Image: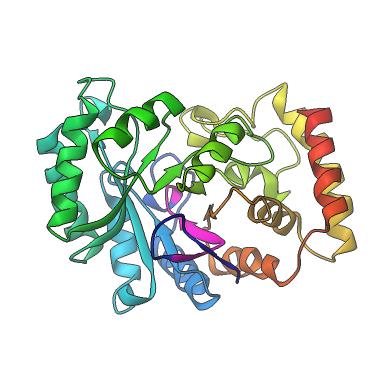
Amino acid sequence: MRYKQFGATDMNVSALTVGTWAIGGANWGEVNKSDSIRAIHAMLDCGVNSIDTAPGYNFGESERVVGEALEGRRDKIYITTKTGVYNDEKEGFVKDARKETVFRLCEESLRNLRTDYIDLMVIHWPDIQHNTPFEETMEALNTLKRQGKIRYIGVSNFEQEQIEEIRKYGQIDAFQPPYSMVNRSQEELMKWTCSNGIANMTYGSLGAGILTGAIRELPDFAPDDMRLVFYDFFKEPKFSKVMQLLKVLDEIAGKHNAPVAQVAVNWNAQKEYVHTSLCGVRNEAEAIENCSGFEWELSDEEMKQIDSAIDTYL
């Protein structure tokens, strides 16, 4: 496993972070809890020392699975969870970053995760439902930091102007944007955050699975499947464009006698402004396969070849 200094923090974080949205089980196809826990353990055994979850992943179920998986291993891993978003039976996905909500979600997360502190607390989305001032949200997070319940603060799905504004009220140590070969929309912002001492941890790093090469025909997902709802990779015309990119990745993977997924994780990790990449896994075999990708590297020429193919097809 490779490691990078995580921005201005004292954390030296693995190139892969265990992503656990799908582990929550809501609208991600069939998910098996026992397999999920074994997958987490396999990634830790391969040197991964970072895991990401959120209370908004199926009413805290993802956090509870993570808490169970980390029993007896807490001191070996950095935990990231989120705030400002939760699930409600009637309202659905609620964006609420008011002070009292931040305090409540933190206490629930600590219980779910079976820990007394969280390494990185990330504001999941800007609060557009209550328009909570950043000053109020940061006041709550800074209080939790002083209490020792959280160590560092991050933001996700923020624009540059929002990051600049929220930094007026406290230190922001991490940014979590979507980033992969099939979504480079946040690339310039990531370069800016990196230059400002803010670590980047990317989500959707395998394009919700499309960059593993396992899906070669337009899938028949349920209409509420998150791979259709949240991403545009599994719909035309983008699906066919990604399939053209995969042909290039197939060629490069073949030269390294490696699966396509390893090409994808290496491409992300070798970007200097990426500190760690969230990678969701459903079973032990996927975990070991992804981690084994760091036994080799893409050459500079191969990185350029991939970048050129992305520009051509996407």
In the image, residue 15 lies in the stretch drawn in magenta: yes
Q: Where is residue 278 in the image (x, y as percent from the top left)?
A: 51, 52
Q: Is residue 175 above or below residue 253?
A: above
Q: Where is residue 293 in the image (x, y as percent from the top left)?
A: 69, 65
In the image, residue 60 lies in the stretch drawn in magenta: no
Q: In which quarter of the image is the C terminus?
A: top right
Q: In this view, does 70 lie above or below 232?
A: below
Q: In this view, does 202 lie above or below 90?
A: below
For the stretch drawn in magenta, the main secondary structure is strand
Point out the residue furthest to the left here: 100
Residue in the image at 64% along x and 34% along y: 184
Left or right, 21 with reference to 274: left
Left or right, 281 with reference to 295: left
Q: Position of residue 241 (x, y in %)?
A: 78, 29
Q: Position of residue 42 (x, y in %)?
A: 51, 73
Q: Quadrant of the N terminus?
A: bottom right
* Magenta extent: 12-22
The picture quadrant where one finds residue 93 is top left
